[in-house]
């Protein structure tokens, strides 16, 4: 799957373009169908702008999600010409305007209506990996003596995975999710790595319930489509491979309690020395 065939077109203002939009109202339609809309393009028009203009001027019943319109909330993700995109950040002029532009809801999700996917299972998977810092020593929480300090190197291990906006594009691109709706999915797995790789976290054992099971992490075949689709530059397939290594080491070495980074020593703050180096990114810049 790739959107590399797109081209930049500077003379698009006023050009009439045909949008082929998937429509589906479960209350009256037996199955989804495609409806055509013709629209004259305006300067800087995004795919989301085009949908909003269609709704304003041609069909007020057209349904889609949007909120921030600045690539932050993740709610406007849809399939544009077969590739998952944040439509508020996707210029119509990126595409070949002599051809139709196909807009559909994110693949691999049930459709609630028109371009609105049902993300409830996606959010359940995210919740299932316990997306928060887990510590085993309750006493240190009651009698804390300082901050959970982190070195820049420790932060670097997981930082890119915090950029996820949960738009769902990675799951729409994933070939495993296309055949297994119960697969934990790239978003939740990469989010799990975000916490497991955090030097303050000790929750891998608790997360194994969601990760190390038949529909969990080992179903990832490393296609890499999730990393190609992520609009925020996160590399979920890298996180998943690193998480596999963490689980493997955990199984071999057993439970390993991470020292509190703020432990007092005569030399000052104690640092972990065994920070593994991340392999090269799986996506070329
Ligand atoms: Fe928020 Fe597009 S509307 S990311």
Image (cartoon, rainbow, N blue to C red):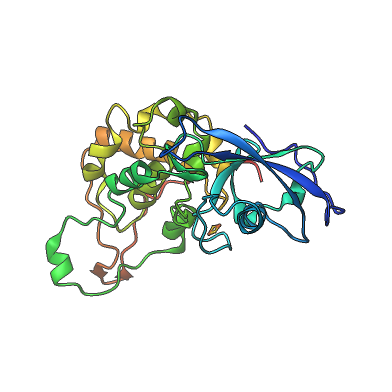
Q: Nearer the viewer, residue 131 or 6?
A: 6
Question: Is residue 39 in view from this perspective?
Answer: yes
Does residue 191 appear left or right of residue 146 in this picture?
Answer: right
Q: Which of 224 and 151 is in front in this view?
A: 224
Picture coordinates of residue 249, whole percent (x, y): 31, 36
x then y, percent, for residue 259: 25, 57
Q: Residue at x 27, y 38 (%)?
A: 210
Question: Is 29 located above or below residue 97 in the figure?
Answer: above
Residue lying at 85% horizontally and 54% vertically, measured from the top left: 10
- The N terminus lies in quadrant: top right
Q: Where is residue 126 in the image (x, y as percent from the top left)?
A: 34, 47
Residue 186: percent from left, percent from top:
43, 39
Q: Which residue lies furthest to the bottom in this view?
A: 145
Figure quadrant, ligand 1: bottom right
Q: Outermost residue toward the front? A: 28
- The residue lying toward the viewer, choosing from 190 and 153, is 190
Residue 282 seen from this side: no
Asked whether, in this view, residue 30 is left or right of residue 272, the answer is right
Camera-side residue of 284 and 121? 121
Identify the residue at horizontal 66%, vertical 46% (top origin).
285
């Amino acid at each position: 799957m790739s959107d590399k065939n797109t081209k930049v077109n500077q003379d698009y203002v006023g050009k009439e373009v045909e949008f082929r939009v998937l429509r589906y109202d479960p209350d009256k339609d037996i199955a989804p169908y495609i409806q055509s809309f013709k629209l004259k393009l305006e300067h800087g028009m995004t795919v989301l702008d085009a949908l909003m203009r269609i709704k304003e001027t041609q069909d007020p019943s057209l349904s889609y999600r949007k909120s921030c319109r600045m690539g932050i909330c993740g709610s406007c993700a849809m399939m544009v010409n077969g590739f998952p995109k944040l439509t508020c950040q996707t210029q119509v002029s990126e595409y070949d305007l002599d051809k139709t532009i196909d807009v559909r809801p994110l693949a691999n999700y049930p459709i609630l209506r028109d371009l609105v996917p049902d993300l409830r299972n996606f959010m359940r998977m995210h919740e299932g990996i316990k997306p928060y810092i887990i510590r085993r020593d309750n006493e240190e929480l009651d009698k804390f003596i300082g901050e959970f300090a982190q070195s820049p190197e420790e932060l670097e291990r997981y930082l890119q995975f915090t950029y996820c906006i949960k738009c769902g594009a990675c799951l729409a691109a994933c070939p495993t999710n296309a055949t297994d709706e119960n697969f934990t999915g790239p978003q939740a797995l990469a989010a799990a790595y975000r916490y497991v790789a955090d030097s303050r976290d000790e929750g891998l054992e608790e997360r194994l319930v969601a990760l190390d099971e038949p529909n969990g992490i080992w179903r990832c075949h490393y296609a890499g489509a999730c990393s190609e689709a992520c609009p925020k530059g996160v590399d979920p397939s890298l996180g998943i491979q690193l998480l596999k290594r963490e689980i493997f080491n955990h199984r071999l070495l057993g439970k390993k309690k991470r020292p509190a980074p703020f432990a007092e020593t005569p030399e000052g703050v104690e640092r972990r020395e065994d920070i593994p180096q991340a392999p090269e990114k799986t996506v070329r810049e």
